[in-house]
Image (cartoon, rainbow, N blue to C red):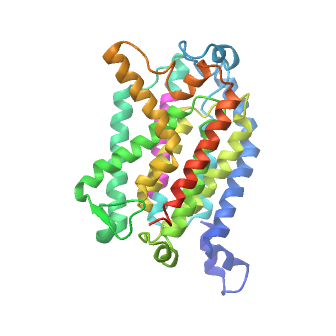
Amino acid sequence: MLSLLTELSDGGDFFNLFRYITFRSGGAFFTALFLSFAFGRPLINRLKLLQKRGQPIRDDGPESHILAKAGTPTMGGVLIFSTTLIGALLWAKPSNGYVWMVLFCMTSYFCIGFADDYAKITAHSTKGLSARIRMLLGLLIGVIAGVWTMWLQGDGLGGYLAFPFVKDYMLNLSIFYIPFAIIVIVGAANSVNFTDGLDGLAIMPVMIAAASFALIGYLVGSFKYAEYLGVHYVNGTGELAVIAAALIGAGLGFLWYNAPPAAVFMGDTGSLALGGTLGAMALATKHEIVLSIIGGLFVVETLSVIIQVAYFKRTGKRIFLMAPIHHHFEKKGWGESQIVIRFWIISLILALIGLATLKVR
């Protein structure tokens, strides 16, 4: 809403700064970061009070988790979501449709995650909402996001799929873009959810991906840069940099409390909302396939679960010692911090490869 202050500008004063996406992105970042530090500890204390026994721990998980992580409160995603939302609403342009589409996906998945975590806490069980309910709600969100994106992008871009490393070509999916959008949104949300299993493991790759899409949104939303890079110009996506910056600020604030040993877990409340946000940004910028590169770590985590389940049902045996794959390395004797930092490094490398697709065409 602060972008409206530009109406007070004569073109050469302080209020003119609010015209610039870079300035407002910085404002969103520091707003979310400050709020995270200011309210993080009070929220954690409140969660501890409400959650007597903390997040339920899987009985079949690594033995160290049962002892080390028992009693740690969950639903820390409330901190990430609320500070991101406040930062975005304060600094992004309210007239931008992509802003509202992305915030819709984030908020919707936050609600699903909140309900799922609440069900787990009240029953003190690792089983929350039924998989069928989560899937149906995810499908609905994906349909709305797909239709909304097609409407915002219009006839020239709506329903088309762009490819990395390819210039001036898009595949017209037409109405089939909607089921594709469902795959992107649901897949992104659940893949981040699978990755969230160790202290600090999920939040850093999410911030890396958000930073990547902040840059992609800014470049794709500028006709000059889009023409220079040979990517498809999508008017208005520059504002997504403001949301991404707020998410990064909120993520850093959360990581302060989630760093090993974690004082709080993000839970499904955070992981689903963060994944849904990344998926929505990919749809808006027409970089859906690039998301699978930048978020390659999330893809690997998800595939490890799918492969493990499919192979076990077929043979009664397991390929991995435990899925998702970060638990496999725990079972092999890797330390938690060792796994987390190495996965961060992999995530950064994949993000750089994904960003390279902007120029390699």
Image-quadrant location for residue 157: bottom left
Q: Quadrant of the C terminus?
A: bottom left
Residue 171, given in percent of the width and then of the height, sits at: 28, 61
Residue 296, given in percent of the width and then of the height, sits at: 50, 44
111 in magenta: yes
Residue 223, given in percent of the width and then of the height, sits at: 48, 77
Q: Is residue 35 above or below residue 307?
A: below
Residue 115 falls left or right of residue 180 = right
Is residue 113 in view from this perspective?
Answer: no
Residue at the image point whose x is 68% and y is 14% from the top? 67
Residue at the image point whose x is 64% and y is 49% from the top? 83
Q: Is residue 19 above or below residue 53?
A: below
Magenta span: chief secondary structure: helix
Q: Is residue 107 above or below residue 234?
A: above
Residue 17 falls left or right of residue 180 = right
144 in magenta: no
Q: Which residues are magenta?
A: 101-117
Residue 315 falls left or right of residue 94 = left
Seen from the viewer's position, the closer of residues 112 and 233 is: 233
